[in-house]
Image: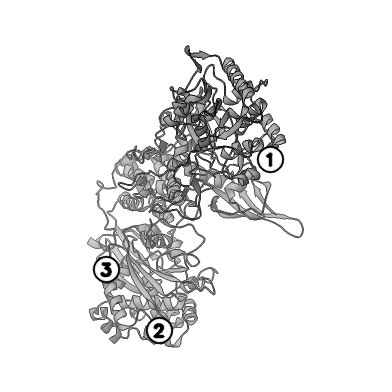
Amino acid sequence: MATVYVNDKAVDIGDERLNCIQAAERAGVTIPHYCWHAALSVVASCRMCLVEVGERKVDEKGQVAIAMQPKVVPGCQTPVKDGMVIRTADAKAKDAQERTLESILLNHPLDCPVCDKAGECLLQDFSFQFGKAESRMVDEKNTPPNKPDLGPNVGLFTDRCIMCSRCVRFTREVSGTAELHVVNRGSHSEIDVFEGHPLANKLATNVVDLCPVGALSSKDFLYSQRVWNLKTVNSVCSGCSTGCSILVDSNKDIVYRLRPRFNPRAQGHFMCDEGRLGYHHVNDSARLGQYLVRGEQGTKAVEWAQAAGLCREKLAAEASKDPGRVWFVFSPSMTVEEAWLLANFAQKLSPFVKLVMGPVGVVGEDDTYPKDRKGRPVQPVKFTIRAEKAANLRGVQGILNHFQKDRATYQQFLAAAKSGQVDACLIAAGQSPQVYKPSVEEGDALSAVRFVAVQQMFSSPLTDRAHLVIPASAFSEIEGTLVNHAGLAQATKAACAPSRGLRTDGQFFLELLERKGLVHAANLRKEIAKAVPAFKPLEVGDLGEYGVFCEKLKEQS
Amino acid sequence: MAAFEPVLLQRLNKPECKTLEGYRADGGYRTLTRALKEMSPDQVTTVVKDAGLRGRGGAGFPTGLKWTFLPKGNSGPVYLCVNCDESEPCTFNNRYLIECDPHQVLEGIILASYAIRARVAYFYVRYEYGTGTRTMQRAIDELYAAGLLGKNILGTDFSLDVFVHRGAAAYICGEETGLIESLEGRRAWPRIKPPFPAIEGAFRKPTIVNNPETLANVVHIVERGGEWFKSLGVPPDPKNPRDAGSYGSKLYCISGHVNRPGIIELPMGVTLRELLEVHGGGVWKGRKAKGAIPGGNSMGICTEPEFDIPLDFNGPGKVGCLGLGTAAVTVFDETTSIVDVLHNICRFFAHESCGQCTPCREGTAWMLKIVERIKRGQGRLEDLSILEEVADKIGIMPGTTICGLADGAGWPVKTAIRKYRDEFKAYLREGTPKGGTSSGMRLSMAAGH
C-alpha cells in the first residue's frame, strides 16, 4: 500500500503505477497539463504540470521530516511512490505554472470569441485557474497562416496551437498512419502534413478532441454552435458492434456533434470518424414524421395511439387465425428494452408467432489500428472498427433466444412472404441508413402480405409497401441498453425528444402491450434481468458510466 | 614555466599525418595496438577514470565515470556516439582536430569503443563541416583497408564499425539525446531523462556520447598514463569536495575583436587575460576590451575586470557564468554596443530552440523580440526585469525544460543585463548606444566563419 501526500492530503494509491497528475486527481487536486494524455506516450514538453515533489520520512521517534527537491519537476513524467509529497500550490510550482501559461499565451491569438473551442478549452480553464490576467508582452505575435485543409474532416488554426504534440503522437501511436508532424523550429514550430498525404485516416477527427485548444477543428462542427449552448448526454455509438461510448451534444433537439467518451471496458478514449459523423440522418428533414395508414381509400395520417391501436388489432386478428403466419422482424439496432417489449407483445398474441432477426449489415472486415505506413495492422491493437454494423445484435439475440430458440432467418422470412406464407408482419425499428438500406426486392417480397407494419426512419421500398408506417426513433432519441461485441451492456440516454406528435419506439411498443407509463430503462432492465437469465447483470438497473458485462450474451454468438 | 608542448595539436602543422601512413610514422596507433594486446577493456576504463578526464563538450562530466554507468553484464549491443555537432558559436576546436588530425580522433574512438565494448560507433558531424566529414571518411576508409576497423582488429577478438553520420544543421543535435534522436532518423527533440543514454540511448540500447576532443585525450591518457595527465591543469579545489578538478590540456578558441584569432592548446587554468593578451595578441585596433564570452554563447558574458578568471571548469562560474563550456573565447571591444551583442546572441537561440518545451520555445523568441525592440530604440525600463526573469526561469536548473540548452539561452541574457545594466539603461534613455549610433555590427558568431 502506497500513500502519497498531495498538498498535505494523504491519498492511498494501492499498488498502481501512477504519475503525479493521476495521483493528485485521486486527491481531488487538478494539476494543469496539456501534452500529457493517458492514451499517449509521455513527452513532458508543455511544462504545464510542473510541481514540487519531495519525500516524507518518519524517524524512530515519530518525527515527520519532509525533504523537498530543489527543482520543480513535470508531474506527468514523475512516477509516484510511497511517502512521496506533491505540492501543486506552493510558490515555486505556482510560479512555474503561471510562467508556462504566460509563455503559451505569448503567441496565442486570444480569438476566443470566434473559436469553436471556447467554453471547453483547457487554455481558458487553466488560464482562469492558474494563470495571470495580463500578458507582459507588448510585441507583435507570430501569425502563421491557417491550414484549413489538413484532411477531409480536420482543419488547423495554426496560430492557436500550443505545440503539445498530442495530435502528432496520436497519428503515430494510435492510428499509426503518422500523417502529422512538426515543421520548423522554435516559436515557428507548426503542425503540418506531408504534401499529398492529408490527415485522412479513419480515426483522424480524434485529434480534434485531443487538441486541448482550438487549433485542430472538426470541419463538421466548425462554427455551428457555441459549446455552452449544447446539452451533453452519455450515449453509445450505433455505428458498429464495437459500441463506443460517446457523448451526444445537442441543442433544441438538434444533434450537432458526437464525441468519444472514455470507457476502458468498451473502446478506450477514441471513436472512428464513421461513427462520429454518422449522426446527420438524425437531423434530416426527410425523416418520416407521421403515422400513416395506407388503405384502399388512399393514405392518411393518424395519431400515434390510433396507429398503435390499429397495429395491435390487425396483428391480433391475423394471429387468431393462424399465428404461424404472423411474423415479427427485429432489428439488431434496437435496444434490449425495445426488443423485450416487442417480443412480449408478440408472445401475448400467441407463442407461435414467428420472431426473426432482421438484416445485419456487414461491411468488409474488422479494421484494426494502429497501422503501419503501408496500411498493415500492427499489434497490439488499440482500436477496432468492426465489420458488423449492428449496435445491439447480441442483446436482441439474447431476448429472441429466450422466447424462440429455432428461428427463421431474414432471408427465409422474405422467401416466405414471397410465396404467400405470411399474413401479417411487423418490421420493427429500422436501422440508420448508413448501416442498412432496404432494397426494392425486399419491398416487392411483401406485396402478397395482408398487413404490413413497418417502423423506419426514412421512406424506403419497405415503407412503400406498408399498410401502417411507423416513424422510427433515432439513437439520440431513445433510452435503453445496447450490448456490444464483447457482451458489454451499456446504457444510452435520450439527447433529444422525438418530433412533434411522434413517440419513441419503446413507447409505441408499450402502447401495443397496453402497458401504462413511460419507458423507464432502469425499471425495464430489472424486469428483463428477472425474466431472462442471460441478462442477470442488468438487475442493477443503473449500468453506470462504463456498463456491465453480460458474459452469456457474448457466448451465444 | 617551460613552454607547453601541445599534445592534441602536435600534428597541426604536419599535413602528412592526415594519412594513415603519415600518422603511423609519427607514432600513431601504437597506443591502440598496445591497449588491444595488453589491456582489458576495464583497464582502459580505469586508466581514463583515474586520470580524471572530464568531457570537453561543455558540461564537463567525468568521462571514465560515464563509461562505468553502462549496465553491468549487458549482453546486447552498446553504441558509441561521437558528438561532433559542434554548433556552439565561436567553437572550432573539434573542427581542427578532425580536419588536421583525423586519425588521432579515430584512435580515440577505437580505444573508447574497446573500453565500453561497443562494436559500432557513430561519428555524428554537423552538416557544415564538409571538409571534416570528408577527411574523417577518408581516414575511416584507410583504416578498414588496413584492418584497423572491421572484423578482428589487429588480430584480436575486438571488432568495430565506424559510421559517419552527417547532421542536418541544428544546434539542438549537440544535446546528447537530441543527437541520438537525430541519428535514429527523427526530429532532434531531446529525450526526457532518466533513462540516461548510458542505460537506454541510440536504438534503445546503452550508448555513450563523447566529444571528439575528449576521445583524442583518451589516446594520450592511455599512452602516457593518468599521472602525466594529472600533471597538467588544475587540481580539485580542496574546499569543494564535489570538484573533480580540471586536469589536462584544452583547446582554446579565440575569436572576436582580437589581433590573432585562432586555436591554441594550453593546460587548463590559463586566465582569460593571458589567453587574450599573450595568445590572442590583444584586442584589435589598439582598443580596450569591453567584455568576453568565456566559453561559447551559452556560458554568459564576463566583463573586462573579470578577465583574471582561470579558464578551467570552475573559473567562469566564479563570475556568474554558467561554466567553461567549450572554452571558446569571444572578445568584444569597447566600441561594441552590448545591445548588439545581446541581440546577436538572442537571435541565435531563438533560431535554434528546438521548440519542444514551452518555456524555451516561447521564452527565447520573446527575449529576442524584446531585445530587438530595445535595439530599435523602443525599449522600456521594465523590459530589463522581464528579460532577467525569463532568462532566470528557463532551463533544467529551475527544472522547467527537458534539456540544458535552455539554461544556455538564458545565461548570456541575465549576465549581460546584470553586468552591463548601466549601459542598457543609458541605451533605453537615449535609444542609441553610448557615444554613437547602433552599428548594426554582427560578430562572426558561427564557428569558423
* Colouring method of the image: one colour
Report in which chain the residue with disc 2 lies: B
| Disc 2 residue crowd, few under 14, some 14–19, many 20+, Cα 10 Å | some
Q: Is there one chain holding both mark 1 and mark 3?
A: no
Q: Secondary structure at mark 2?
A: helix
Q: Is residue A50 left or right of residue B269?
A: right
State the residue in front, A113 or B153: B153
Amino acid type assigned to the residue bearing label 3 in the image: Gly
Residues at discs 1 and 3 in contact (Cβ within 8 Å): no
Note whether B298 is above or below A549 in the view shown. Answer: below
Label 3 is found on which chain of the structure? B
- Quadrant showing the C terminus of chain A: top right
Disc marking residue A284:
none
Q: Amino acid at mark 2?
A: Glu
Instruction: Find disc 3 in the rendering and name its residue.
Output: B281
Q: Quadrant of residue A548?
A: top right
Residue B93 vertical placement versus A108 (above, below):
below
CB-based contact (under 8 Å), mark 3 and mark 2 = no
**Dot 3 or dot 2, earlier in sequence:** 2
x then y, percent, for residue A448: 49, 25
Q: Amino acid at mark 1?
A: Pro
- Helix, strand, or loop for circle 1? helix
The residue pinned by badge 2 equals: B223
Q: Are marks 2 and 1 on the same chain?
A: no
In 3D space, how far apart are the residues under numbered discs 3 and 2 (Cα atoms)?
33 Å
Q: Residue at x 42, y 42 (%)?
A: A204
Instruction: Tell me where residue A407 appears, x and y as whole percent.
Output: 59, 37
Residue assigned mark 1:
A537
